[in-house]
């Protein structure tokens, strides 16, 4: 991994949640969408290294904060029922049930996942409570696991491994053996909550021992490499993979007040 570019988006005059944002892939670049005022949607362009206003949402139109936005089929979903057509720059509510369902599937609870069921073929993973996990197969429980912190991402599978992030109790990235539930990797993160995966490699941000991007090889079940990143990663940092690049956000603070979002472009591979 190589850090190619870094940009600073000042947020001195706006509320931090307006700047959590979402990435938007275009043929020539990947832009970062955010709010710079309650109803003013902006796009930061890496090519021009500046933000531009895309659209002012009518005040009577209820939209979610940017951390809940998603780009689906050329529309920026601002809520389940309101979207901005990114081609015509017009608001639209005429989305299909399939598109709305795809949007709902991306939404995680505001705090953490209290419980859930994750079927993986013959295995069924169940999560309940603060840190309890069990696995059923052939009609019986074959293992249980107690981790640290609350579940903040979906549980995902790669071959014979499970992986996910928790927050609270410091926050951890866990890689478990699917058959036994034994932890293969247990990496303290400081409470970040974004995972990106491509070609058997898993990426996530951590604060300990320093702010950095982790790359875990899911097939070899080991940390492949780390890359120090300026700024402070947090629960609302975003990761996005486009082609052979990964984009990440961290935050700058002064006297505990946000003063900027750092947008990082990382080239993947050797």
Image (cartoon, rainbow, N blue to C red):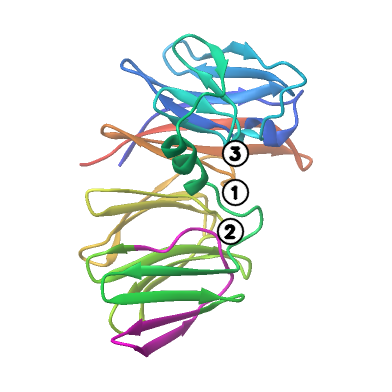
Mark 2 secondary-structure assignment: loop
Q: Earlier in the sequence, mark 2 or mark 1?
A: 2
What number is the disc on residue 234?
1
- Provide the secondary structure element on which disc 1 rests: loop
Q: Residue at x 57, y 32 (%)?
A: 21
Foreground residue among 104 and 198: 104
Percent across and percent down for residue 267 are 30, 34
- Within the magenta stretch, is there residue 208? no
Magenta segment, which residues? 133-156
Main SS of the magenta part reads strand
Q: Earlier in the sequence, mark 2 or mark 3?
A: 3
The image position of residue 235, as x and y in percent, is 59, 50
Residue at the spot of label 3:
67
* Residue indicated by mark 2: 191
Q: Position of residue 33 (x, y in %)?
A: 54, 24
Q: Are marks 2 and 1 in contact (CB under 8 Å)?
A: yes
Image height of 242 relative to 189, above or below: above
> Relative to residue 123, is residue 208 drawn left or right?
right
Query: Which residue does the image show at 53% across and 59% down from the upper left?
Result: 208
CA gap between label 3 and label 1 equals 12 Å
As helix, strand or loop, the secondary structure at mark 3 comes to helix
Q: Is residue 263 visible?
A: no
Which of the two discs, 3 and 1, sits closer to the camera? 3
Query: Can you say whether 153 is above or below 58 in the image?
Result: below
């Amino acid at each position: 991994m190589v850090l190619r570019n870094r940009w600073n988006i000042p947020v001195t005059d706006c509320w931090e949640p307006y700047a959590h944002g979402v990435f938007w892939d275009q043929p020539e670049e990947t832009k970062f969408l955010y709010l710079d005022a309650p109803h003013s949607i902006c796009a930061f362009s890496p090519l021009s290294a500046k933000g531009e206003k895309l659209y002012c949402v009518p005040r009577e139109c209820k939209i979610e904060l940017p951390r809940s936005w998603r780009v689906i089929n050329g529309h920026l979903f601002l809520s389940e029922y309101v979207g901005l057509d990114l081609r015509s720059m017009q608001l639209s509510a005429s989305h299909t049930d399939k598109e709305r369902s795809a949007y709902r599937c991306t939404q995680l609870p505001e705090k953490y996942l209290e419980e859930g069921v994750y079927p993986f073929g013959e295995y069924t993973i169940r999560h309940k409570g603060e840190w309890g996990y069990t696995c059923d197969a052939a009609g019986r429980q074959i293992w249980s696991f107690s981790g640290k912190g609350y579940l903040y991402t979906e549980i995902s599978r790669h071959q014979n491994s499970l992986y996910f992030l928790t927050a609270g109790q410091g926050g951890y990235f866990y890689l478990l053996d699917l058959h036994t539930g034994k932890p293969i990797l247990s990496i303290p993160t400081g409470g970040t909550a974004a995972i990106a995966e491509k070609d058997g490699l898993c990426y996530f941000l951590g604060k300990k021992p320093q702010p950095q991007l982790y790359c875990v090889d899911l097939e070899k079940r080991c940390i492949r490499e780390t890359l120090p990143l300026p700024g402070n990663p947090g629960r609302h940092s975003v990761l996005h993979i486009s082609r052979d690049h990964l984009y990440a956000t961290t935050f700058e603070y002064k006297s505990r007040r946000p003063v900027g979002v750092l947008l990082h472009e990382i080239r993947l591979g050797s």
